[in-house]
């Protein structure tokens, strides 16, 4: 279960870190955080509220810069909200941007270990799952080759295979469904449907509307940091501003 | 400080994997591989021995220069290479930090761990040199272990603070080469503080490495013990420094993904 309640996130427009570090050090001594907006700052999220129940598959849809990835980052606990609360129940596996964490000099097999561990797998678990991961990626002959020699398609397939074999309860899938050739995409969709059947919670971000409608139970439309519409039966805590 | 094992325990496999990864990347496609770990302190030791025997003949110590320099360079190399690995560790993993959660201290600390493996290899040479030069070993050699733990904790503190600061200001990375060099001359690696005046000693003791390196050398090649109250004082100081550094890291960590 994921619940976002009136979540605001402030970002800096330029690289002005000095104040932010000073703030951090000051906040060591005092609890209260600054709430307002200063020059060169903007709200990436403005009071976003929604909830995702266990086993649900939710799509986030909206133009570039709407705040979709920020929401995923918040759910993954990579960054924290300026205001509002987020509660996440269960282990999260962000299907991170393809190959983040891959090291080019290491072999496919070695990278499975690293990426698996980053996704929160235990070493034993990784060892057990390697055959399945390799099979799924269809890279049997190349798995002991340094990944710098892979084609970009092979690279993507390996990364996707690792992520999809995680035992996590919640999957965050950010724009990575366009993986490999058509046959492999078909396979990925099958796998996602499969995970859904196993009762995994999923949040999907993609610009491919057709694909999203195929897998998502409901779609949350986001624009300029606000939820403008939720199709389906999601619970709304606050009405979007411009409908007031 | 009791929260740290609790926080890191679920991620210990990741920690191990990162150490293994750093280690195997380092020596991949290199011919002499792990010998590099030995080469640095060894070549520095040879250079110092050459300089202070032939170019600037100077009486530094009654013990063989080879042993004396190596005894100082061993802990120093651990400290400096830890910092070299750790300082850019967070910014190098930009794509992980902005995408996925894990305790960030794993990155700088695995840098320290890799330096520790290098230290292990370099220690083999130390043992060989001790045998070769027939050093008189006494029970005081066991001081080496608690002193090394002090060095480890001190190094980890510095690594945590500097790597976190480097996320905010890349100046840290730019300054680190030069700062480490300054620090080298401020530490008793190729000199001993034994015969200095009390006033000078006190000034040099402001640098915690002075106490650690000087005593790590004494307890092994000179067979001398460590003054208890000094050791206790340093232990308290280093522990305090570590908990402050860790706290600093935890506070700044929350914003890494936003400012990196």
Image: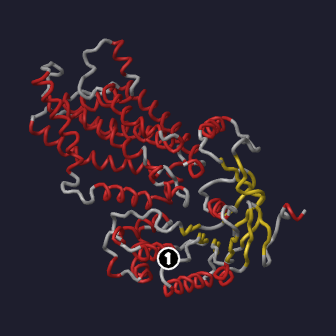
Nearer to the camera, A131 or B11: A131
Tell me what residue is drawn at x 63 percent, y 63 percent.
Answer: A69
Q: Which residue is mark 1?
A: A165
Q: How many marks?
A: 1
Residue B211 falls left or right of residue A119: left
Residue at position x 53%, y 46% from top? B2
Position of the C terminus of chain A by quadrant: bottom right
Q: Using the image, determine if residue B122 lies above or below residue A126.
A: above
Going by the image, does B10 lie left or right of B22? right
Residue A241 falls in image quadrant: bottom right
Residue at the limit of the structure toward the right, as seen here? A244
In front here: A198 or A179?
A179
* In the displayed structure image, the side of residue A138 where residue B119 appears, left or right: left
Residue sitting nearer the eye, B226 or A212: A212
Q: Residue at x 46, y 54 (%)?
A: B93
Image spot of residue B210 (x, y percent): 34, 26
> Which quarter of the figure is the N terminus of chain A placed in?
bottom right
Figure check: A117 above or below B211: below
Give the class, few, some or many, for how many residues have Cα within 10 Å of label 1's Cα (few <14, many ≥20): many
> Left of A68 or right of it: where is B199?
left
Residue A89's place in the image compared with B54, above or below, is below
Residue B206 coordinates in the image, percent (x, y): 41, 23
Disc 1, SS:
loop
Q: Quadrant of residue A231?
A: bottom right
Query: x, y (%) of residue B74?
Result: 25, 38
């Amino acid at each position: 279960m994921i619940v976002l309640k009136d979540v605001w996130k402030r970002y800096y427009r330029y690289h002005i870190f000095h104040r932010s570090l000073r703030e951090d050090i000051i906040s060591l001594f005092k609890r209260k955080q600054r709430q307002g907006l200063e020059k060169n700052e903007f709200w990436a999220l403005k009071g976003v509220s929604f909830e995702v129940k266990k086993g649900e598959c939710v799509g986030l849809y909206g133009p570039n810069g709407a705040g979709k990835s920020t929401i995923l980052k918040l759910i993954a606990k990579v960054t924290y909200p300026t205001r509002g609360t987020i509660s996440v129940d269960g282990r999260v596996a962000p299907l991170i941007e393809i190959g983040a964490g891959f090291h080019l000099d290491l072999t496919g097999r070695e990278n499975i270990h690293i990426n698996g561990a980053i996704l929160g797998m235990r070493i034993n678990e990784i060892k057990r799952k390697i055959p399945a991961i390799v099979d799924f990626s269809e890279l049997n002959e190349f798995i002991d080759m340094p990944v710098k020699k892979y084609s970009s398609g092979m690279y993507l397939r390996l990364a996707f295979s690792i992520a999809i074999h995680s035992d996590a309860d919640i999957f965050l899938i950010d724009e990575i469904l366009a993986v490999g050739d058509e046959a492999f995409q078909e396979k990925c969709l099958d796998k996602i449907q499969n995970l859904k059947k196993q009762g995994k919670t999923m949040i999907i971000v993609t610009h491919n509307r057709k694909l999203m409608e195929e897998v998502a139970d409901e779609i949350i439309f986001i624009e300029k940091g606000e939820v403008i519409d939720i199709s389906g039966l999601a619970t709304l805590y606050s009405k979007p501003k411009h409908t007031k | 400080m009791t929260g740290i094992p609790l926080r890191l325990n679920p991620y210990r496999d990741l920690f191990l994997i990162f150490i293994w990864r750093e280690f195997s990347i380092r020596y991949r496609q290199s011919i002499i591989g792990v010998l590099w770990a030995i080469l640095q302190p060894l070549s520095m030791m040879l250079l110092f021995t050459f300089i202070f025997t032939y170019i600037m003949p100077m009486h530094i110590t009654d013990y063989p220069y080879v042993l004396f320099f190596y005894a100082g360079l061993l802990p120093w190399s651990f400290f400096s290479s830890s910092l070299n690995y750790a300082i850019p560790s967070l910014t190098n993993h930009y794509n992980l930090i902005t995408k996925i959660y894990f305790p960030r201290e794993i990155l700088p600390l695995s840098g320290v761990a890799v330096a520790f493996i290098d230290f292990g290899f370099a220690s083999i040479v130390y043992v060989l040199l001790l045998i070769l030069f027939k050093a008189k070993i006494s029970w005081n050699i066991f001081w080496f272990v608690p002193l090394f733990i002090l060095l480890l904790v001190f190094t980890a503190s510095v690594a945590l603070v500097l790597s976190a600061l480097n996320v905010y200001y890349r100046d840290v990375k730019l300054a680190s080469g030069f700062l480490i060099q300054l620090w080298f001359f401020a530490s008793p690696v190729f000199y001993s503080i034994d015969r200095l005046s009390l006033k000078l000693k006190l000034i040099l003791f402001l640098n915690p490495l002075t106490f650690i390196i000087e005593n790590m050398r004494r307890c092994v090649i000179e067979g001398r013990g460590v003054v208890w109250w000094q050791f206790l004082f340093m232990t308290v100081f280093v522990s305090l420094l570590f908990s402050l550094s860790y706290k600093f890291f935890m506070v700044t960590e929350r914003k890494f993904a936003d400012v990196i």
